[in-house]
Image (cartoon, rainbow, N blue to C red):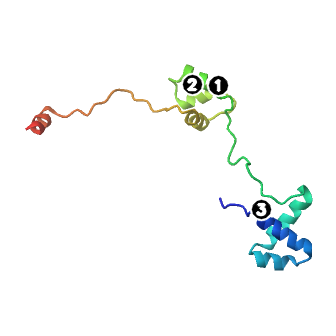
Amino acid sequence: MPAPYSDDLRTKAIAAVERGERKTDVSRMLNISRNTLDLWLKRVEQTGNCRAIRHYHQGCRHKITDWQRFHEFVQQHGDKTQGEMAALWGDNVTQQNISDALRKIGVSRKKRLTAIENVMSSNARSSKRD
């Protein structure tokens, strides 16, 4: 995502328009679009400043918000699949929501069913020793 224009550039553009310069000339001089300048002027009218909006939430919100309760839930139902955990949790939570929440709290869902060794045949071992 591109960075917003600096507050300094915004205030210079607004000041130039307030001094009486034409919007088109200001937008060409500062290499910004006319629509951007109009949006800044509109923001000044509405809020009193033309600063960029910062620290807004990007992306979707988590369906699971009570992390302590979820951590206890994982301790209790850790042997189940993510789909089964989603059905037990309720609140229209999907398997993907459970997966994302597990990643957020740092719990790995990889399970090793058996301890698998790299077993070489006895002939391969004996020939490797020689």
Position above or below: 3 against 21: above
Pointer 2 local density, CA inside 10 Å: few below 14, some 14–19, many at least 20: some
Of marks 2 and 1, which one's residue comes earlier in the chain? 1
117 lies left or right of 69: left
The image shows a total of numbered marks equal to 3
Q: Of the numbered discs in the image, which one, if any, rests on residue 44?
A: none
- Report the mark closest to the observer, 3 or 1: 3
State the CA–CA distance, disc 3 to disc 1. 40 Å
Secondary structure, mark 2, is helix
Q: Which mark is residue 74?
A: 2
Comparing labels 2 and 1, the label whose residue is closer to the camera: 1
Between 45 and 98, the residue placed more toward the observer is 45
Front of the two marks 3 and 2 = 3
**Could you say whether the residue bearing mark 3 is in a helix, strand or loop?**
helix
At which x and y percent is residue 109?
49, 32
Q: What is the x, y in percent for residue 103?
A: 55, 36
For mark 3, what is the residue?
Answer: 7
Q: Nearer the viewer, residue 25 or 108?
A: 25
Quadrant where the C terminus sits is: top left
Q: Amino acid at mark 2?
A: Val
**Mark-to-mark CA distance, 2 and 1:** 10 Å
Q: Quadrant of residue 73?
A: top right
Closer to the chain start, of discs 3 and 2, is 3
Question: Which of the two residues, 52 or 57, is positioned nearer the viewer here?
Answer: 52
Q: Quadrant of residue 125?
A: top left
Residue 127 percent coordinates (x, y): 9, 38
User: In percent of the image, x 79 and y 75: which residue is there?
Assistant: 27
Give the crowd class for mark 1: few <14, some 14-19, many >=20 residues within 10 Å: few
Q: Which mark is residue 68?
A: 1
